[in-house]
């Protein structure tokens, strides 16, 4: 092939390549660079802590201890009824079950529980105390806002010192 | 006829014109030039459900970070605040031309109350990110202040996918 023909072929080739380049650029430009964008939100609900309030105190009322070496039990039910067990004990009435109200996110589920018991004390100088045990609640559906009634058993012997005794215990409510 | 097709056609015409310049004794040459292009489908991001931190009790003091994982777990972080219930990871489908790689960008935005801060949003999208990806999960970290008011709140975030 002569120089002239080679040159011509070269130009033709260059032109083709040039336009091929343009075609190529068009194909690249057609390659989507679209970003697909989605704007959305994350949700959160803020609620207050649960508050437990004692509406009514658990009371055993007036109880008479056994006269001799015996043990009597006095059980106040969550509903307020009294059951005397053991031997020789007498209830003179006046008992009430405890009542607690829980507030927080209305309708939220929570778990109610009775906790540790504090030894009974008296301001009358007695040293042989009754014993509080068997805390129990009424098992109501645990959704806020709600109230729960609590009962327990008090064990008294003939050796228990006379007087007014205070027996402490804890209750708790936790979101569940 | 598209511009690209026009261009190719024009290129072909030029090629033929230069070759047919009357020169005796020279043979013609033809060059086949393929037009190459890649056609892709638009990327689509579909939300199955959004990220939800559920019901939270704020800490009594300071701030506390609550983390919803892409595995749908929740970690309440250090503090006396509580993650009560109802959290959920987000879930999305990212579709386009199957087999193509893409860049995924997730950006945390502002919340509806100043006592809340969406610190980060993450995904479990497979790496490298190749379409189509279904059920891409989104998790995040929410900082809750003690003064966060009761009620429903939202925090913005965005998801962007690009070839």
Image (tube, coloured by chain):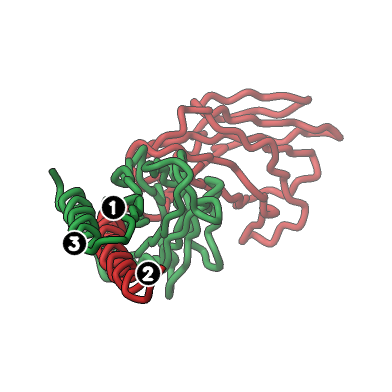
Chain colours: A red, B green
**Element assignment for label 2:** strand
Horizontal relation, residue B37 to residue B72: left or right:
left
**Residue B21 pos. (x, y %):** 18, 62
Q: Is residue A99 above or below residue A29?
A: above
**Residue A103 pos. (x, y %):** 36, 46
- Crowding near pointer 2: few (<14 within 10 Å), some, many (20+)? many
- Crowding near pointer 3: few (<14 within 10 Å), some, many (20+)? few
Q: Is residue B103 above or below residue B90?
A: below
Front residue (pair A79, B103): B103
Query: Residue at the location (44% across, 41% down)?
Result: B98
Q: Where is mark 2, residue-wise?
A: B145
**Element assignment for label 1:** strand
Q: Which is closer to the viewer, label 1 or label 3?
A: 3
Q: Is residue B59 above or below residue B69?
A: below
**Which chain is disc 3 placed on?**
B
Q: Where is mark 1, residue-wise?
A: A36
**Which chain is disc 1 placed on?**
A
Q: Where is mark 3, residue-wise?
A: B22
Q: Is residue A159 visible?
A: yes
Query: Residue at the location (32% across, 51% down)?
Result: B35
Front residue (pair A25, B39): A25
**Residue A58 pos. (x, y %):** 52, 41
**Element assignment for label 3:** loop
**Which chain is disc 2 placed on?**
B
Give the alpha-carbon distance from disc 1 to disc 3, as whole Å: 55 Å
The first of marks 3 and 2 along the sequence is: 3
Front residue (pair A153, A52): A52
């Amino acid at each position: 092939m002569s120089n002239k023909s080679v040159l011509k072929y070269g130009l033709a080739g260059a032109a083709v390549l040039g336009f091929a380049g343009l075609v190529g650029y068009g194909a690249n430009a057609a390659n989507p660079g679209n970003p697909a964008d989605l704007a959305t939100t994350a949700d959160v609900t803020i609620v207050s802590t649960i508050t437990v309030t004692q509406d009514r105190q658990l009371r055993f009322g007036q109880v008479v201890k056994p006269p001799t070496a015996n043990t009597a039990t006095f059980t106040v039910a969550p509903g307020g009824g009294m059951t005397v067990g053991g031997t020789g004990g007498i209830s003179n009435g006046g008992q009430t079950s405890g009542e607690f109200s829980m507030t927080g996110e209305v309708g939220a589920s929570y778990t109610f529980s009775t906790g540790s018991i504090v030894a009974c004390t008296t301001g009358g100088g007695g040293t042989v105390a009754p014993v509080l045990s068997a805390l129990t609640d009424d098992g109501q559906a645990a959704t806020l806002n709600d109230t729960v009634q609590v009962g327990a058993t008090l064990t008294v012997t003939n050796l228990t010192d006379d007087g007014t005794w205070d027996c402490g215990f804890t209750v708790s409510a936790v979101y569940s | 006829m598209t511009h690209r097709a026009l261009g190719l056609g024009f290129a072909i015409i030029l090629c033929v014109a230069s070759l047919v310049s009357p020169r005796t004794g020279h043979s013609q040459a033809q060059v086949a030039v393929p037009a190459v292009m890649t056609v892709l489908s638009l990327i689509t991001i579909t939300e199955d459900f959004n990220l939800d931190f559920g019901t939270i009790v704020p800490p009594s003091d300071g701030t506390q970070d609550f983390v919803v994982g892409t595995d749908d777990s929740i970690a309440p972080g250090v503090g006396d605040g509580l993650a009560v219930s109802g959290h959920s990871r987000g879930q999305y489908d990212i579709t386009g031309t199957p087999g193509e790689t893409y860049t995924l960008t997730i950006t945390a935005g502002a919340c509806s109350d100043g006592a809340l801060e969406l610190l980060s949003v993450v995904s479990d999208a497979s790496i490298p990110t190749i379409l189509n990806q279904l059920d891409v999960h989104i998790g995040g970290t929410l900082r809750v202040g003690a003064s966060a008011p009761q009620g429903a709140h939202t925090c913005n975030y965005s998801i962007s996918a690009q070839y």
